[in-house]
Every structure is written in structure tokens, then in C-alpha cells.
């Protein structure tokens, strides 16, 4: 019962409370961000997508931690979720600085990601860890794409995305070392398709 209450609390805090980072927001010293209106609009859209990704990360890790019976794995997943909270706070703050808002569909994204995480966990810990590996690798590629698209002058957003990308690589490596197994091709393709729907929609809504 305690774990179910904890999962519910995590959902409410993720969706409705102001996230608080344990680490300071990454910055590029001595570089000032000056953007045109069009550059600001693009940066905000990309950071909204990244914020949605962090909403989903909280849901995935919470669901997987809830379902596993392995205390060590639960601790690893909860620790990764704490680091993802930094990302959630950084992207939320950057959206505010850009004068924009998070996705209006965040409750939907959270529910969908929670369901996917629960299904992966029910298939066993090694599959659950493999799901983390594949998710984080896809997120790495997604973040690299954002680095390619973000305005060169947007040092603030770029610094955040660079740190996020580094953290996701660590999470993928940790999950692989803990015993994650490769997912079958159709599962990886389905994950990419779901991510495409989410990122395309969140860019605007």
C-alpha cells in the first residue's frame, strides 16, 4: 500500500507541483542569450517537448519501481527518477524564461508512459531494464536532434540539453550493466512511433 501511495504522490507532484532540482541549472559562463521572436518561439517549442519527455520519464520510472520486487533495482530506478526531476525543473524554468507554457496534455502523456512502464516491468526485471536502455538511447538521439535545431545563440537551452543528454547516457549504461536485455525490433519500432506522436503533438500543444 505504501508503494501505491508513493506512486500516486509522485504523479501528483510531477503534474501539479513546482519541481525542485537538486543540482544547479547548467549554464554557459559569460554567454548571454539573445534571441529573435522566431528563435524564441522555436526554442520554446523544443523545450516544451523536452519537458514532456521528463514528465514521461517520471511516469516510466515510477511505474517500474512500483512493479519490481527487487529492492536494489527499485533503489536504482528511484535514484534515476530523482535525477530526471532535475531535468523536469530545468526545462520548466526555461519554458518560463522563454515566456511559454508546458504541454496541455501532460496528464495524458503521464498516464500513457506509466502504462508502458508497468507493462515492461510485468515482463520481468531484465526486460524492464532493457526498456530503460532503449528509452534512454532514443532520448539521447532525440536530444541530439534538438541540439542541431536549437538556435546557436540560445546558450541557456543548449546547456540544459547537453547535460540532459549526458545524464540519459549514464542511465542507459547503468540499466545495461544491471542486466537489461535488448528488446525485439518490433518493440523498439513501436516505442519510436509512440515517441514520434508525442514529440510532434507536444511541439504545438
Image: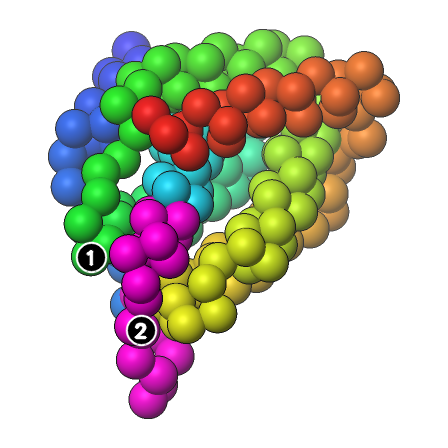
Locate residue 141, reporting x and y percent. 66, 47
Which mark sits nearer the N-terminus, 2 or 1? 2
- Could you tell me which quadrant the N terminus lies in? top left
Q: Which residue is mark 2?
A: 33
Locate residue 134, reporting x and y percent. 70, 34
- Mark 2, secondary structure of its residue: loop
Q: Residue 37 sits in which quadrant?
A: bottom left
Q: In front: 93, or 11? A: 93
Kindly identify the residue that appears in the image at 62 percent across and 54 percent down.
144
Q: Residue 124 sits in which quadrant?
A: top right
Circle number at residue 97: 1
Instruction: Tell me whether the residue at label 2 lies in contact with that at label 1, contact meaning CB atoms closer than 8 angstroms.
Output: no
Kindly identify the residue that appears in the image at 15 percent across and 34 percent down.
17
Q: Which residues are magenta?
A: 25-44
Locate residue 79, reporting x and y percent. 43, 45
Magenta stretch: helix, strand or loop mostly: loop
- Crowding at dot 2, Cα within 10 Å, few <14 / some 14-19 / many 20+, comes out as few
- Crowding at dot 1, Cα within 10 Å, few <14 / some 14-19 / many 20+, comes out as few
Determine the residue located farthest toward the bottom in the rendered image: 30
Locate residue 6, reporting x and y percent. 27, 23
Determine the residue located farthest toward the right in the rendered image: 185
Amino acid at each position: 500500500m505504501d508503494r501505491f501511495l508513493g506512486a500516486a504522490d509522485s504523479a501528483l507532484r510531477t503534474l501539479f507541483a513546482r519541481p525542485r532540482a537538486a543540482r544547479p541549472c547548467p549554464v554557459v559562463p559569460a554567454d548571454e542569450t539573445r534571441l529573435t521572436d522566431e528563435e524564441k518561439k522555436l526554442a520554446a517549442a523544443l523545450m516544451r517537448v523536452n519537458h514532456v519527455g521528463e514528465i514521461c520519464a517520471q511516469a516510466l520510472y515510477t511505474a517500474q519501481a512500483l512493479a519490481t520486487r527487487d529492492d536494489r533495482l527499485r533503489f536504482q530506478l528511484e535514484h534515476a527518477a530523482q535525477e530526471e526531476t532535475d531535468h523536469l525543473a530545468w526545462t520548466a524554468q526555461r519554458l518560463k524564461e522563454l515566456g511559454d507554457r508546458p504541454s496541455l496534455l501532460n496528464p495524458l502523456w503521464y498516464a500513457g508512459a506509466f502504462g508502458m512502464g508497468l507493462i515492461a516491468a510485468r515482463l520481468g526485471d531484465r526486460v524492464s531494464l532493457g526498456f530503460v536502455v532503449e528509452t534512454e538511447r532514443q532520448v539521447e538521439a532525440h536530444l541530439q536532434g534538438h541540439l542541431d535545431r536549437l538556435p546557436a545563440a540560445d546558450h541557456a537551452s543548449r546547456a540544459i540539453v547537453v547535460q540532459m543528454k549526458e545524464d540519459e547516457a549514464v542511465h542507459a549504461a547503468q540499466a545495461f550493466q544491471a542486466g537489461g536485455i535488448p528488446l525485439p525490433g518490433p518493440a523498439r519500432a513501436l516505442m519510436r512511433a509512440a515517441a514520434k506522436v508525442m514529440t510532434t503533438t507536444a511541439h504545438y500543444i
